[in-house]
Amino acid sequence: MFIRTTAILSTLFQRLCSHPKNLLVWVGVALCGVGIVVGTYFLSLRTGMDYVRQTGLQRLDVYVAAVDNALEKYDYLPKTLELNRQITGLLLSPRDPERIKAVNTYLEQVNQQAKSSVIYILDVNGIAVASSNWNTPTSFMGADLAFRPYVQAALHDSQGRFYAIGTISNEAGYYFARGIYQHGKLLGVATVKVSLEKLEKNWARGVDNVILVDENNIIILSSEPALKYKTLGSLAPQLSARLGQIHQYDNQTLPSLEWQDIQKFDDGTRVVSLRLPVTQSESVLHTQIHTQTVPTALLTAKTQLLAQTRALTQPNWRFILLSDLNKVKRSARATSAFAAVALSFLVVLFLYLRQRHLAVVQSGLAKERLQRAYENLEQMVQERTSALNSTTLELTQEIKDRHQAQLALELTQNELIQSSKMAVLGQMSAGITHELNQPLTALRTMSDNALVLLDRGHTMEVRNNLSVILELIDRMGAITRQLKVFSRKSPSMLIPVSLRRVIENALFLVERRLELEQVHVVVEVESELASGDIFALGDANRIEQVLVNLFINALDSMLNSERRCLMINVATQCEGHEVAAGAKRVFISVRDSGAGIPDDVVPHLFEPFFTTKPHGLGLGLGLVISSQIVGEFGGILTGKNVLTTIMLDNNAIATGALFTVELAAA
């Protein structure tokens, strides 16, 4: 149908153009169409540029407000340091070690709370006498910073602001400085350095191409790192010399981007020509900045961009938003192309209507073919709908089956954990029986003695015997009560758990074996936690189960050791374990003095049914279940060898395996 219609329109067009008058009409129509397409292009280009300018001004306000807010919230900080008596006391006695230590600690705390880069105190000679980074490799302690303009400004008018790259840390930042006075006398300078790198990273993740230019037309922040520390024009020799003296942009060559204004608008917006680092296949700033893979071989080419500028409140900086005009041009070309297509469509439609009477003959055949196509389409829709309904039913049933399987799996896991407890209790049964038999034998003997003494009238001895009997009964009750708590089922609920109590209960359960095997137990708590209790999120009963499993494994590994020592450590930091910023974790480490774990066994520690114990003494599920329990609490159980020697009570003890339980702190 389409081919036939095209042939008909082609024949009609030839007939229309065969007459001279018709040819002139078509030439006029063609010229009119070209005029409409060209006018559409320029109108769309102007509209697109107006839209880019309007939206760019709004986004500039947001960027400027973000930088102003980031700087203004630190403006007060140097002034508040003047109120601290320790700082004024240090400036009066700058060589007092105690004062230096106290001020360094105070500045470190303030720096952490304010989230600034560094805070430091200078004397009247510009020498740093205290700094928040006193204990880092890039410490400012003793540094001579008198050459910095912000130091000179603070020494003369009590306030200084400055952006520069640090000569010690090599990190850029904005400096706030104020003089510290006492009774009108200048004692020194308080300085706060703030990093603006976070803002720059946020810009790099955005869609805008923005640069922040200082008063010397040097780009200090940019959404594209390749533009940083470039200049918008050549620097005067005097200015270059001045920047070198104050080391504002230390180790930076400050090359020029050859910024050139091409067109200016009334609102200050400009079309500029800018030399940017681009590749052979990429000549647009937007494409270069937001492409993930940028070739290392870069060329230089000039491109035209729309630059919109907004000045900051403080300091004398300018924000420049660079918009790619190629997008606007492409949009204008697309609009003009659409206009051309629309005009062509109207011409074709006109020709088609002229020839519509020729299609009447074909209408019957077309209707018949259309009816057949409709019937086929309806049948296909029904078949597709039926298949979709069947698939939906199958998916629904599969979801139900998966849900039931998940419930069964959780039930099986809980039963497996409970079975593991019973297995541990079975291993401890001999020691528990001995613990109960001794008090029972003593109870029998004391009771018989009490009867004899009672017959003889020795009431005081009877009272003493009854007191001993009560103590034995309390001890037996504690044993059975602890076993009842350990063996009961408990739901996995995350609540604050006392780690001191959990460790004591777990050691109580293996106490008899510790005595029989003469194992020395050492419990160490981090100094910061030693003053109070330690709490972690979890379930006390299940954490006890994990620790009992680890204690029993440690005791088994020390059976052939000359010196048996079980070391338990509780801390908030652990070597080899990275803690995310802001996260609070607690680490329980269990180390033994055994022979360690064979190298070929370490990769299989947490595999189900893998065990190195003799047949009948282990199922290979203890560590697997313990790892699962810790994982339910959002923690991690790890194991490794720590083959080293430590000093304990003036004795050298060789250590073996180390297992660490990492939990979330409550």
Image (cartoon, rainbow, N blue to C red):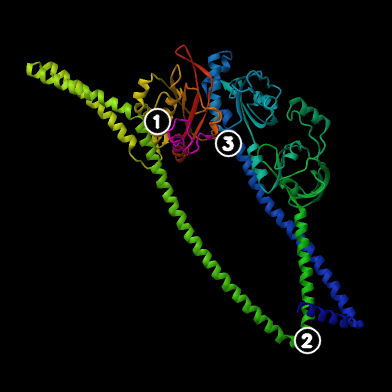
Looking at the image, which residue is at 67% across and 41% down? 312
Q: Tell me the quarter of the image containing the C terminus.
A: top left
Q: Which residue is mark 3?
A: 73
User: Which SS type dominates the magenta stretch?
Assistant: loop
The residue pinned by badge 1 equals 548
- x and y, in percent, of residue 29 in the image: 84, 75
Q: Mark 1 and mark 3 in contact? Answer it, CB < 8 Å.
A: no
Q: Position of residue 640 (x, y in %)?
A: 53, 28
Name the front one of labels 1 and 3: 1
Magenta stretch, residue numbers: 604-626
Q: Residues within 10 Å of mark 1 (few under 14, many from 20)?
A: many
Q: Earlier in the sequence, mark 2 or mark 3?
A: 3
Task: Describe the element under mark 1 as helix, strand or loop.
Answer: helix
From mark 2 to mark 3, how far is it between C-alphas? 80 Å
Q: Is residue 498 above or below residue 330?
A: above
Q: Residue furthest top?
A: 650
Tag 2 residue? 358
Residue at 66% x, 49% y is 59
Which residue type carries mark 3?
A: Lys
Residue at 39% x, 26% y is: 532
- How far is mark 1 from mark 2, CA to CA? 95 Å
Whether the magenta-drawn stretch holds residue 666 is answered as no
| Disc ID at residue 43 | none
Where does residue 87 sit, x and y in percent of width and height? 55, 21
Position above or below: 358 against 460:
below
User: Looking at the picture, which amino acid does disc 1 mark?
Assistant: Val
**Frontmost residue, 505 versus 211:** 505
643 or 96, nearer to the observer: 643
Name the quadrant of the N terminus. Answer: bottom right
Of callouts 1 and 3, the N-terminal one: 3
Query: Which secondary structure lies at badge 2?
Result: helix
